[in-house]
């Protein structure tokens, strides 16, 4: 029987107030969800491998156990039966644990949601104050007990508030990564490797061809283009949540102190990041800017590249910040003059290294280029399978 979720919203935030950034406490609910345990204290869990090391115990458990008896995909997504919750479900459910605020993972209509405080706030900004029933925030490292299941969130390094879901049940540990990256990012907490028996990973860039360039080199390309073409507006397509704010922060790290002009669709998320103390500098709206912005940087959704909206600029030079810019066909298809290979996902070497670092003896691949990764892991004597979860989007990266 499914346990009930808390019957009230997270404490310290008014309903419908998406701008609050308070770290909300988690309380105990008799007979329901959750019971708080000390951080990282999970009883009755055998020792697991240290990052980067193989664990005979962990691998033996993974090979002899049936994770699908308690963690399995259903028509809504990945479901933890003993805990009574879905992880990033694709349709409305009673209880959902959400890894981060992107639209292919955080959908409206759930009765109750557990996530980081930032993810809850970003969902309200994206989807409206009534996008879910009840919300409860869980801080990184804080552990909850649901019957025999212990659950905590660990940083995923994807965007602000992104988290991996760490589940311990009857001596087994499963980690569901959500989307993640391994590069340094001044706008969010870095990915934390968690030793586990089962690692459920994304594979957005799960082909050997995908090897992201160093971020500083790609930003240097943008700054060099500004110097080479001072009479042109540099319009860069970015995803509105995460990529936009990260590119601005990377520019600031490399000494660019001029205003970065924003399309109106990027305003609310960028203001939220700035309100969380992330140094983004001056970000005026394009609508308020004088002239044609020659020699300036303008950030917009990718859909605005080459659109009528761009006609206001001085001979706009189209750029696009995405891991997909590694593929020349995509560059040509979008008419991009300045491809910037900046991704918020792990590339092929980082996927392989991360899986090895967890010490997992079994790996499930949720979305992306599943078959290639499953094949590679099989060559490394790691049990792997493709879940082929529906509703995951790659192009928005």
Image: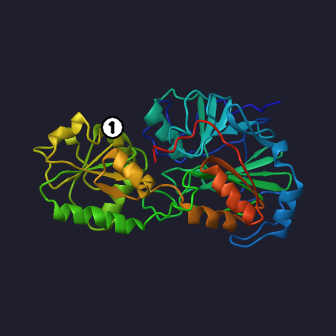
Q: Is residue 187 left or right of residue 143?
A: left
Mark 1 neighbour density, 10 Å: few (under 14) some (14–19) many (20 or more): few
- Above or below residue 89? Residue 367 is below
Q: Is residue 146 left or right of residue 370?
A: right
Q: Is residue 175 visible?
A: yes
Q: Is residue 20 left or right of residue 198?
A: left
- Which residue ends up furthest to the left in the rendered image? 291
- Which residue ends up furthest to the bottom in the rendered image? 53
Q: Is residue 3 left or right of residue 286?
A: right
The structure residue drawn at horizontal position 62% and vertical position 36%, both measured from the top left corner, is 390
Q: Quadrant of residue 250?
A: bottom left
Helix, strand or loop at label 1? It is helix
Q: Position of residue 76 (x, y in %)?
A: 68, 32
Instruction: Tell me the residue that label 1 is attached to.
Output: 265
Q: Position of residue 118 (x, y in %)?
A: 50, 46
Q: Position of residue 393 (x, y in %)?
A: 52, 41
Give the quarter of the figure containing the N terminus. Answer: top right
The structure residue drawn at horizontal position 87% and vertical position 63%, both measured from the top left corner, is 60
Q: Is residue 17 visible?
A: no
Between 387 and 3, the residue placed more toward the observer is 387
């Amino acid at each position: 029987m499914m346990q009930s979720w808390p019957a009230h919203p997270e404490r310290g935030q008014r309903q419908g107030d998406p701008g609050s950034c308070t770290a909300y406490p988690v309380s105990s609910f008799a007979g329901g969800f959750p019971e708080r345990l000390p951080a990282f204290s999970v009883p009755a869990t055998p020792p697991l491998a240290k990052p980067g090391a193989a664990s005979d115990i962990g691998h033996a458990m993974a090979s002899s156990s049936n994770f699908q008896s308690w963690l399995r995909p259903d028509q809504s997504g990945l479901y933890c039966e003993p805990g009574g919750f879905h992880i990033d479900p694709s349709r409305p459910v009673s209880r959902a644990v959400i890894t981060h605020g992107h639209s292919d993972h955080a959908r409206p209509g759930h009765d109750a949601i557990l996530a980081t405080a930032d993810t809850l706030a970003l969902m309200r900004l994206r989807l409206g104050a009534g996008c879910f029933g009840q919300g409860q925030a869980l801080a990184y490292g804080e552990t909850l007990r649901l019957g025999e299941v212990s659950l905590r969130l660990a940083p995923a390094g994807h965007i602000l508030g992104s988290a991996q879901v760490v589940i311990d049940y009857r001596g087994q540990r499963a980690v569901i990564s959500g989307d993640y990256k391994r590069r340094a990012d001044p706008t969010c907490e870095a990915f934390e490797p968690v030793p586990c028996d089962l690692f459920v990973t994304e594979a957005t860039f799960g082909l050997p061809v995908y090897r992201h360039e160093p971020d500083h080199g790609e930003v240097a390309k943008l700054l060099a283009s500004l110097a080479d073409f001072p009479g042109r507006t540099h319009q860069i397509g970015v995803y509105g949540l995460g990529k936009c704010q990260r590119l601005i922060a990377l520019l600031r790290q490399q000494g660019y102190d001029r205003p970065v002009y924003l399309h109106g669709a990027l305003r609310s998320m960028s203001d939220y990041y700035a309100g969380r103390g992330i140094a983004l500098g001056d970000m005026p709206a394009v609508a308020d800017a004088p002239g044609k912005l020659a020699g300036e940087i303008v950030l917009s959704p990718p859909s605005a590249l080459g659109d009528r909206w761009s006609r206001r600029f001085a001979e706009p030079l189209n750029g696009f910040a995405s891991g997909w810019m590694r593929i020349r066909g995509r560059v040509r298809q979008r008419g991009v003059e300045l491809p910037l290979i900046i991704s918020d996902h792990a590339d092929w070497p980082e996927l392989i290294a991360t899986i090895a670092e967890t010490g997992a003896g079994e790996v499930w691949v949720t979305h992306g280029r599943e078959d290639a990764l499953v094949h590679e892991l099989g060559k490394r004597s790691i049990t792997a399978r493709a879940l082929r979860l529906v509703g995951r989007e790659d192009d928005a990266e």
